[in-house]
Amino acid sequence: MERWASGEQYEPYVGRWSRLVAAEFVAWLNQPAGRRWLDVGCGTGALTSTIVRDAAPAYVLGVDRSEGFVEYARRTVPGATFEVRDAEDLPDASFDIAVSGLVLNFVPDRDRLLRRLGEFGDVVAAYVWDYADGMQLMKYFWEVAGEVDPARRDLDEGTRFPFCRPDALEEMFTGAGFGEVAGRGIVVPTVFTSFEDYWTPFLGGQGAAPAYLSTVDETTRDKIRDALRERLPVESDGTISLTARAWAVRGTTR
C-alpha cells in the first residue's frame, strides 16, 4: 500500500526528521575520512547528504528502487552518486561501509539483505523508526485512525513491524554473522509550527499513513483530522512539540 514516488511530498512528512536522525547516526558510526560508503534505500538522500557533509568520504553511492526519490536526491545532494536499484540488485563494487536508513522494515528477506551488505566492507549499520512507541507523529495518527476506522488497524506500522526494537535488531545482526554488534536509540525533536504543518504532509500520499489516508472517504478523513486536532498537545502559540525515536544498530564483518 505504501507509495514512494515524490521526494517533494515525502520530505515534509518524514524526510526532514530523518535528516536529524542521520546526523546523530553518522556521528555515532565515527568512521575515518576517505572511506567508500554505500547507502541502500537512500530515498530522498537524507542519510546520503549527511555522509557527504559530515564523514568526509572518498565516494558515496546511494541506491533506491524509487525513480522519483532518486531523481530528487540527484537534484538536491551534490557530491554523491545515485542509482535506481532494488535492495536485492546491489552493485558489484567495493565499499568500506554499508548503511541503510528506514528501510529494513520494508525488505521481505532482511537476513538475506544484511548478509549481502556484509560482502561490501567491514562495517554494516542501519536505523529504523521506533514505530510502536517512540515515533510520536505516526503513533498519534494510527491511534486515532484505529479508533475512527477500526477495520484498518492492521495497517499501523507499530503492529506491522514488531522487530523495530533494540533487542530484535541486535539479534538480527548477530544472526547475520556480524561481530561487535551494538545498538542505541536516537531521539530528535519534531516541532510543528501549527496543526496544518503536522496534518498537511499526511495528504501527500507518500509512506504508509498518507497512502492509507488517500484511500478513505472524505468523511473518514475529516473525522481523523478533527480527532487529531483535539488529541495532539497543541501549545498556546499553536505549535506542537513531539519527538521521534529511531533505533540504530551496527556490526563488523572482520
Image (cartoon, helix red, strand yellow):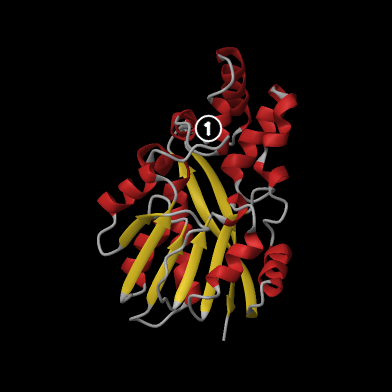
Q: Which residue is painted at 50% across and 52% down in the image? A: 189
Q: Where is residue 35 drawn, in percent x and y? A: 37, 79
Direction from residue 232 to residue 56 in the image, left or right: left
Q: Look at label 1 and name its amino acid.
A: Pro
Residue 248 visible? The answer is no
- Closer to the camera in the image, 94 or 19: 94
Q: Which residue is painted at 42% across and 39% down in the image? A: 5
Residue 226 vs 195, above or below: the answer is above
Q: Where is residue 54 drawn, in percent x and y? A: 35, 70
Q: Where is residue 59 drawn, in percent x and y? A: 32, 72
- Closer to the camera in the image, 198 or 217: 217
Residue 182 vs 107, above or below: the answer is below
Task: Specify few, some or many for label 1: CA neighbours under 10 Å numbering under 14, 14-19, or 20 or more.
Answer: many
Direction from residue 184 to residue 201 in the image, left or right: left
Q: Which residue is painted at 42% across and 60% down in the image? A: 47
Residue 96: which quarter of the image?
Answer: bottom left
Q: What SS does tag 1 mark?
A: helix
Residue ranking furthest to the bottom: 254
Q: Where is residue 168 drawn, in percent x and y? A: 72, 63
Residue 225: which quarter of the image?
Answer: top right
Residue 194 vs 129, above or below: the answer is above
Q: Which residue is painted at 46% across and 78% down in the image? A: 30
Quadrant including the N terminus: top right
Direction from residue 133 to residue 85 in the image, left or right: left
Residue identified by numbered label 1 = 210
Residue 120 visible? The answer is yes
Residue 251: which quarter of the image?
Answer: bottom right
